[in-house]
């Protein structure tokens, strides 16, 4: 059945917005069908916001350039999406807007309808996720002004990790820091919540055991799951911790930050820019934040080739090292699952990681890996290795409907 056919069915729709610093992903889900379909009836992305060119792409349509107000490009992008959503509604009702909000802090452990008070709370966490938090909140604020009655639901990337034991949450700082809320929160929770569901459906009982899920995209993290619950993860207090990423450093000796400030005289904003925007694959290679763009340069016999080889080796080493740490926490591993843009589509990164984890008894099926198959290990492998596309938007839509249902049952939200 085509997206258009699904769109014509009766029932309300839920809009999901996933806002980043230069892009907004959007998706409409048919809330009138039970269970909620995992495929949206329509989706797309505005990217390159604040740059030239800015493009918009929708279901079945190649991205095309668009002109946005240069003084308020982000607001203009949101207005463009609202116009196109209204056109797609065709008389149907928008039941809610679900927003991926990266940080819920120590207060929000499940999706919540946003009002002015909640919005003010969430603004306090902007310094902990500066690449995403302010832009999600900007979208929420704009809709609160223009459509105050329309339910908006914040769906938190930190919420899935609420099950972390205290020993995994604590930082080795004075205890007063813990009491002030300085702790390891964990991120990519919408992705891991989806994987906890999808892996169990696809792999059965093995997914209930000791699982390491690898969300490898421009941002990257690992999550150790047991009984489909988060028990350890690599990202911590902020989205800088853990794995080396596209432009973010990952785990870093705090002494290096002190050195940059004391000896090299970088101020706080400059250090933050280096750690968030100039580090990771881009910083080490000097070429790109994307592994597929780096592979062709590895064979070069010059300084560029040397830096690219160093960047890719460090990227893989960090993944392998952190998987080893999570396996130790779990006391072994039954299933390793790759997800997100790089995890789902880079057979070469998966091959290198599995090569360096052969001591676990992993045997990779090279043909299955090349095809991005759902299982890429051989039948003889002591650890199953999987590729599972993530679906954060569906999780957000489902959470928003849960908030609506709970409020309607309590008589607290008009239907």
Image (cartoon, grey):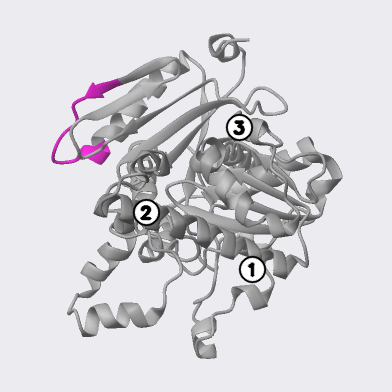
Q: Which residue is drawn at 49% across and 60% down?
A: 243
Expressed as whole percent of the image width and height from the top left, the position of residue 230 reads: 68, 59
The residue where tag 3 is placed is 372
Expressed as whole percent of the image width and height from the top left, the position of residue 276 reads: 33, 60
Going from N to C along the chain, the mark reached first, 2 or 1, is 2
Which residue ends up furthest to the right in the rendered image? 205
Left or right: 164 in relation to 172: right
The residue where tag 2 is placed is 281
The residue where tag 1 is placed is 325
Q: Tell me whether circle 3 and circle 1 mark residues in contact (CB < 8 Å).
A: no
> Compared with residue 104, is residue 65 higher up or lower down, i.e. above or below?
above
Confirm whether residue 110 shows in the render: no
Q: What element carries label 3?
A: loop
* Distance in Å between CA atoms under marks 3 and 1: 26 Å
Going from N to C along the chain, the mark reached first, 3 or 2, is 2
- Tell me the quarter of the image containing the C terminus: top right
Q: Which residue is drawn at 71% across and 69% down?
A: 328
Q: Start and end of the magenta stretch?
A: 64-75
Q: Is mark 1 on a helix, strand or loop?
A: helix
402 or 22, which lies in front? 22
């Amino acid at each position: 059945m085509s997206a258009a056919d699904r769109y014509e069915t009766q029932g309300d729709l839920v809009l999901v917005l996933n806002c980043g610093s230069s892009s907004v992903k959007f998706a409409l889900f048919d809330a009138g069908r039970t269970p909620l379909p995992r495929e949206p009836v329509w989706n797309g992305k505005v990217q390159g916001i604040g740059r030239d060119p800015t493009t918009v792409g929708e279901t079945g349509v190649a991205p095309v350039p668009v002109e946005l107000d240069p003084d308020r490009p982000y607001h203009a992008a949101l207005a463009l999406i609202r116009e196109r959503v209204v056109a797609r509604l065709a008389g149907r009702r928008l039941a809610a807007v679900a927003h991926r909000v990266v940080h819920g802090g120590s207060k929000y452990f499940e999706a919540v309808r946003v009002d002015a008070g909640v919005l003010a709370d969430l603004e306090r966490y902007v310094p902990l996720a500066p690449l995403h938090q302010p832009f999600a909140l900007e979208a929420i604020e704009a809709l609160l002004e223009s459509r105050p009655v329309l339910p908006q639901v914040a769906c938190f990337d930190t919420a899935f990790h609420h099950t972390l034991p205290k020993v995994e949450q604590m930082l080795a700082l004075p205890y007063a820091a813990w009491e002030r809320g300085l702790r390891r929160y964990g991120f990519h929770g919408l992705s891991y919540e989806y994987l906890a569901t999808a892996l169990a459906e696809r792999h059965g009982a093995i997914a209930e055991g000791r699982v390491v899920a690898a969300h490898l995209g421009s941002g990257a993290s690992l999550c150790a799951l047991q009984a489909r619950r988060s028990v350890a993860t690599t990202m911590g207090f902020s989205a800088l911790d853990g794995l080396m990423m596209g432009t973010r450093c990952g785990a870093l000796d705090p002494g290096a930050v002190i050195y940059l400030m004391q000896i090299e005289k970088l101020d706080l904003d400059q250090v933050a820019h280096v750690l968030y925007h100039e580090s990771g694959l881009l910083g080490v290679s000097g070429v790109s934040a994307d592994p597929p763009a780096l592979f062709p340069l590895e064979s070069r016999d010059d300084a560029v080739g040397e830096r690219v080889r160093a960047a890719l080796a460090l990227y893989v080493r960090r993944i392998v090292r952190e998987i080893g740490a999570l396996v130790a926490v779990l006391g072994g591993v039954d299933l390793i699952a790759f997800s997100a843009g790089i995890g789902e589509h880079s057979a070469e990164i998966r091959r290198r990681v599995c090569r360096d984890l052969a001591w676990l008894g992993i045997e990779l099926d090279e043909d299955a890996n090349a095809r991005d198959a759902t299982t890429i290990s051989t039948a003889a492998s002591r650890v199953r290795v999987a590729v599972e596309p993530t679906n954060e938007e569906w999780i957000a839509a489902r959470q928003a409907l849960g908030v609506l249902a709970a409020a309607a049952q309590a008589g607290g939200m008009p239907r």
